[in-house]
Structures are given as C-alpha cells and as structure tokens.
Image (cartoon, helix red, strand yellow):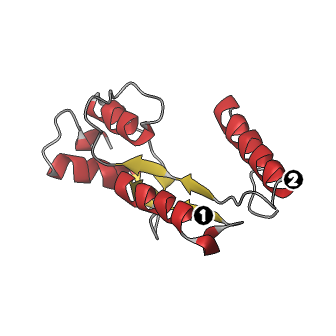
Amino acid sequence: EADTNDAPESAYSESKVAGEAKVWELAEKYKDKYSVCTVHMTYMFGALLPGYQMNSGAMSGHHFLQDMAKGKVMCNMFCVMDGTDFGAAYVAGLERPEAAGQRYMVASADQVSSLEIAEWAAAAGATGVDLAAW
C-alpha cells in the first residue's frame, strides 16, 4: 500500500509497522468472522487520566512539554491531536460497520511548529519555557 511506512526509523516504529501488518494479515485470513479497522495517532496532547504518570512511553506529547519546560529546544513541525479526539475516533471505529477494512489517521489539519507549541505553553502559564532560546 502507498500509505504504509516501509522504512521505520526506530525499533518502536518498526514494531508498530510489523504489528499492523500482522493485524491486516489476520483480518484477511479471518474475514468471515471478524472485521478490522486501524486508528493511528499523531502527537497526542490532552488531560492525563487520573493516576496516569507522565513517565509512560505512550505520553509522547506530554514528554515533549516536559522537555520543553526543562529548557530543551526542539525545532520540529508535526501534526497534533487531542486525546479525546483519538478516543472518539477509536470508538467510532468499533461502532460503525463502514469503518471495517479502513485505516484512519487522527491529526490536525495543519502542521504546527514546536515554537508554536512553546508559545501556547508560555501563554497558558507554563513555567520553564524560555521563548528567548527559540
């Protein structure tokens, strides 16, 4: 497929690509019993669940903010999403029959820069964000 990642750059990315390939292989094998859709996330931001710690690897958007608050400057452009939007897309994939066999990417319509996110964080009162360093 044209929309698959044929050259993952990390073990994490490679495992995600291999995992999805296996899902689609099994979906084809058992298509008479099961239907599958996949929902992919971009950089996720949003409220943490009660009791959820920032040190979880799944919280990449929060790690980005944590690093930024420590003064780390990371020049990047990327799509972002809110965790509640991802949750809604995930549930829709489970509930809607027309989602079967589809791949979805949950992302902002436009890319944002790490500088924009730093500005948003500073405007929201985040401490440690040194805009002069950007």
Which residue is found at the position 20% from the left and 32% from the top? 128
Q: In the drawing, does residue 81 fall left or right of residue 32?
A: left
- Dot 1 or dot 2: first in sequence order is 2
Q: Position of residue 22 (x, y in %)?
A: 79, 44
Where disc 1 sits, the SS reads strand
Mark 2 residue crowding within 10 angstroms, few (<14) / some (14–19) / many (20+): few
Where disc 2 sits, the SS reads helix
Is residue 7 something that shows in the picture? Answer: no
**Residue 127 vertical position relative to residue 103 in the rendered view, above or below:** above
**Residue 108 vertical position relative to residue 133 in the rendered view, above or below:** below
Amino acid at pointer 1: Tyr
Rendered image: mark on residue 29: 2
Which residue is found at the position 46% from the left and 68% from the top? 110
Residue toward you, 63 or 67: 63
Mark 1 residue crowding within 10 angstroms, few (<14) / some (14–19) / many (20+): some
Tell me the quarter of the image containing the C terminus.
top left
Instruction: Report how far apart the C-alphas of labels 1 and 2 lie in the structure.
Output: 21 Å
Q: How many marks?
A: 2
Residue 31 sits in quarter: bottom right
Q: Position of residue 35 (x, y in %)?
A: 70, 61
Is residue 20 something that shows in the picture? Answer: yes
Amino acid at pointer 2: Lys
Q: Position of residue 87 (x, y in %)?
A: 42, 55
Q: Which residue is mark 1?
A: 104
Residue toward you, 26 or 125: 26
Tell me the quarter of the image containing the N terminus.
bottom right
Q: Position of residue 25 (x, y in %)?
A: 83, 50
